[in-house]
Image (cartoon, rainbow, N blue to C red):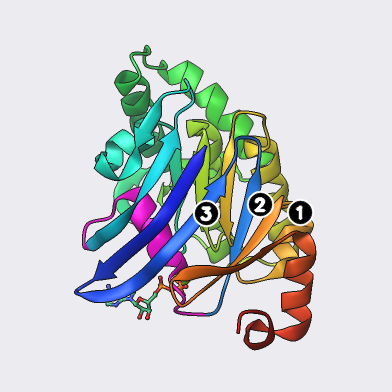
Amino acid sequence: MLKIDNLHAEIDGKKILDGLTLEVNAGEVHAIMGPNGAGKSTLAYVLGGRPGYEVTAGSVEFIGPKGQKLNLLSLEPHERAAAGLFLGFQYPVEIPGVSNVQFLREALNAQRKARGEEPLSGGEFLKLAKDKAGLLKLDMDMLKRNVNVGFSGGEKKRAEMVQMGILDPAFAVLDETDSGLDIDALRVVGEGIEAIMRAPGKGVLLITHYQRLLDYVKPDKVHILARGRIVTTGGPELAQRLEAEGYEEVAA
Ligand code: ADP
Ligand code: MG
């Protein structure tokens, strides 16, 4: 459902992605691993449509939840979100003055509107939010606080997964969702990703540094990104090998 073909991208004239090709079918979870500076976050930003990232060649085709074939790179970021794409960030932003509940309800209803659906009422929304917060073991009080302000690293990641649960995207690109998580939070977040995103019509691109998240989110394929492109693809055993041997051996 996501088909990236020969993608080249630059930041400030500096080439970062250099012919990246990758396809994720509906129902699959793919992991991307790779050394620091390889271009993993750049890939996530390019897919999300962040300004400043210039695509100089290649294409990204996205099959939306209703089977519509979309040229992802031609869409505005909010159109990508409305089409069912969710981006989880390595560094979640803080939004002082806006509560999680306000933010999430606005975000959900904006997407529903773009899809021609009725907005959820306050009561309906709170029920949904409680349900998803429970799944991620995040106290509802946290959702009443301002977005990410004063949250620990683990709380930010769990709040982000609650956001994903509420928006219920067709496809999620998750950039280092495991960073800053202790062992218990890792399990909760990993199981949350499985619960929310493991479904026949959905797909996940999971960018991760460590094999340990893959104990909870079982990838169908593991790719190694180095020097701006996918250099190796394998099954879950590739992540184990990487952990044991390091990138220099496996991605040379
Ligand atoms: P990864 O997530 O794999 O660690 P990134 O995609 O963050 O890698 O970065 C890839 C390369 O792009 C790095 O060399 C980084 O220094 C460079 N880079 C990232 N963002 C910028 C930027 N805003 N301006 C210039 N170079 C950048
Ligand atoms: Mg990164």
Image coords of residue 49 (percent x, y): 30, 50
Q: Between residue 98 and residue 159, name the one nearer to us.
A: 159
- Residue found at x 35% / y 19%: 115
Image coords of residue 32 (percent x, y): 58, 62
Tell me the amino acid under the disc marked 2: Val
Give the class, few, some or many, for how many residues have Cα within 10 Å of label 1's Cα (few <14, many ≥20): some
Q: Are marks 2 and 1 in contact (CB under 8 Å)?
A: yes
Residue 22 disc label: 3
- Residue found at x 64% / y 82%: 247
Which residue is under mark 2? 189
Secondary structure beneath disc 1? loop
Secondary structure beneath disc 2? helix
- In the rendered view, tell whether residue 60 sits above or below residue 157: above
Secondary structure beneath disc 3? strand
Task: Check if residue 49 falls in the magenta segment.
Answer: yes
The C terminus: image quadrant: bottom right
Task: Check if residue 175 falls in the magenta segment.
Answer: no
C-alpha distance separating marks 2 and 1: 9 Å
Q: Between residue 20 and residue 38, name the one nearer to us.
A: 20
